[in-house]
Amino acid sequence: MELIGENVNVMVTKIGTAMKERDAKTIQDLAVAEAEAGMDYLDINLGPARKGGAELMEWMVKTIQEVVDLPLYLDTTNVEAIEAGLRVYKNKRGKAVINSIMARPERMEAELPLAKKYDAGFVALLWGPEGMPRDEAERGVLATELMNKAAEYGIPNEDVWIDPIVTPVTSQQDQVKSMIEFMKMFRDLQEMAPGLKSTCGLSNVSNGAPKDLRPILNQTYLLILEKYGMASAIVDAFDEDLKTFARGERQDITNVVRGVVSGEEPDSGSLPKEQVDYVKTAKILLGHSLYSDSWLQL
Amino acid sequence: MAFETPKITYTGKIKSIAIGKGDQAILLGDESSYPFHLFEGEMPNTPRIAMEVYDVAPEDWAEAALKPFTGVTEDPVAWAKRNVEEYKADMVCLHLISTDPNGLDRPADEAAQTAKKVADAVDVPLIVWGVDNDDKDAEVLRKVAEVCEGKHLIIGPVVEGNYKQVGAGAIGYKHTAIASTPIDINLAKQLNILLGNLGVPDEQIIVDPTTGGLGYGIEYTYSVMERIRMAALTQQDERLQFPMICNLAREVWKTKEAKLTAEEAPTMGDPEKRGILMEGVTAVVLLLAGADILVMRHPEAVKLVREMIGELMAAA
């Protein structure tokens, strides 16, 4: 699975300040550290960036590309800032990716031409005119709308990164399951549009869960989504445990989780405690049992 | 080919609890089907109606709600007796309004003595409800639990912020705890787990999903209760297989619509009938969602709902 480092983010106080003060060293040190931590892409998150967003994105792209060759995700809702970043972006080891374009007519019309003009990819966010899709079917409709629109603008399939929207299992368990159901259809979409990519904001799944239990939720969801062809995830570049899962180094856990996904009922008595915990977590994420903060104790 | 009614296969069952003292004890729960789906399973215990008593005279009640209690609102014992003897309440729910730190802030001892007097005065089971203040309720309900040992009360609300203190009182003096969460199935399950881990026996837990009044969020309560029963009965969710209590009267009667007089709202009909019907409809909706105890106020609404329960139970 390809990993997009999420750490260059205006919401992180230190980074936000560095952006404001144009403190190149802080930004560059972090970008280099993320690259050394094994990221495939770096997300540059400016937030809404209503004031001075264009200048900031231009400076960020130039500053980071001085020290890192990795391709960048340009992450803001400010269209001018996106264009400013794309204009100065140099394709060294891959195209820039616009993060993100919603399935709303006005957003697609404003931003898809940019993807075409600057030969960039884009995250196709499954967020429609009426907001969050209610189930996997609505996700499917929004995905095909974005894919059709991209085709109209002549954007190739491999530049479209479908993001089915990860929701917190603590409050929207049905949506977590519905995203999995959507991923089951994803291969059909790829048959229609060979090369189609996918991505997700993985850690949102554990938002609101007790802090010490967030990693197991993130790791388990990653394994489930990967089984259905999820190609990438936006993650904390320095989460070493998660990376071992993303690199396929935990075959034992991967096997039991995939077993649960395939409908097997593993014999909990014979499994080591660690594997039992992953089985329980997979059952929560698949909606087999209702979430509660103490799910591992049941 | 003969028509066959489609039926749901249930894999779980609601736990059974007993409240009240001796041969006056009432059994609750034990359902093996959705509410009143008597063609699919059993509902061996009839849902019950508890009528409210305040420990001090209420100040903001609608005229229509006060009228049936003329002469007893200053005396919780007399009020409780009227509810039982005249209005045939299955249970009494004593609201310890006077303990509210933002109001009279009366001490726990005094409130516990009132609870004891009421418990002694009536044979039916007693519910004792706090003031939704975690710390004060912890103190008051602990004391109530102790003073009323042997009465098998229902005490609450027990919330995540005070479940240890109140839960310990329920364990020590054998009362049933009202596990109360804010219209959220995941939090409801979590609190039941915590109470279980603390050592509260399953037969001493009843769930309060938090009730919205008609027109004020009842649909959210309905959905959560419906989901709780689905998880309990069809998904073997053991930590949700508890009876449920709905404290609905205060939600109904605090609304603008229940309080407006005929002069203030000439187009909204007779205020008495209006309030009674709002309470009755709210209660029936909650019954259909799976309530085992309804906490109600107006005797006429109680009568309507009791008839409804009788007819639904007889439909088998």
Image: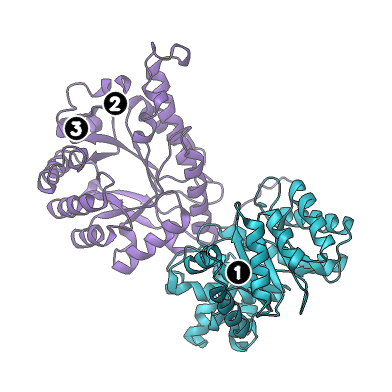
Residue carrying label 1:
A202
Say which of marks 1 and 3 sits in front. Answer: 1
Horizontal and vertical percent position of residue A224: 64, 74
For the residue labelled by badge 1, is the local secondary structure a helix, a strand or a loop? helix
Image point (18%, 53%), residue name: B139
Q: Is circle 2 on the same chain as circle 1?
A: no
Query: For the residue marked with disc 1, what is the amino acid?
Result: Leu
Residue carrying label 3:
B81
Q: Residues within 10 Å of mark 1 (few under 14, many from 20)?
A: many
- The residue marked by circle 2 belongs to what chain? B
Image point (29%, 67%), residue name: B198
Query: Compared with residue B292, is residue A244 higher up or lower down, i.e. above or below?
Result: below
In this picture, residue B72 sits left or right of residue B13:
left
Q: Say whether residue B83 is visible.
A: yes
Query: For the residue marked with disc 2, what is the amino acid?
Result: Trp
Q: Residues within 10 Å of mark 3 (few under 14, many from 20)?
A: many
Image chain in purple: B
Q: Residues within 10 Å of mark 2 (few under 14, many from 20)?
A: some
Query: Compared with residue B91, is residue A10 higher up or lower down, i.e. above or below?
Result: below
Query: For the residue marked with disc 3, what is the amino acid?
Result: Lys
For the residue labelled by badge 3, is the local secondary structure a helix, a strand or a loop? helix
Residue carrying label 2:
B61
Colour given to chain A in the rendered image: cyan
Horizontal and vertical percent position of residue B49: 34, 38
Horizontal and vertical percent position of residue A108: 77, 52
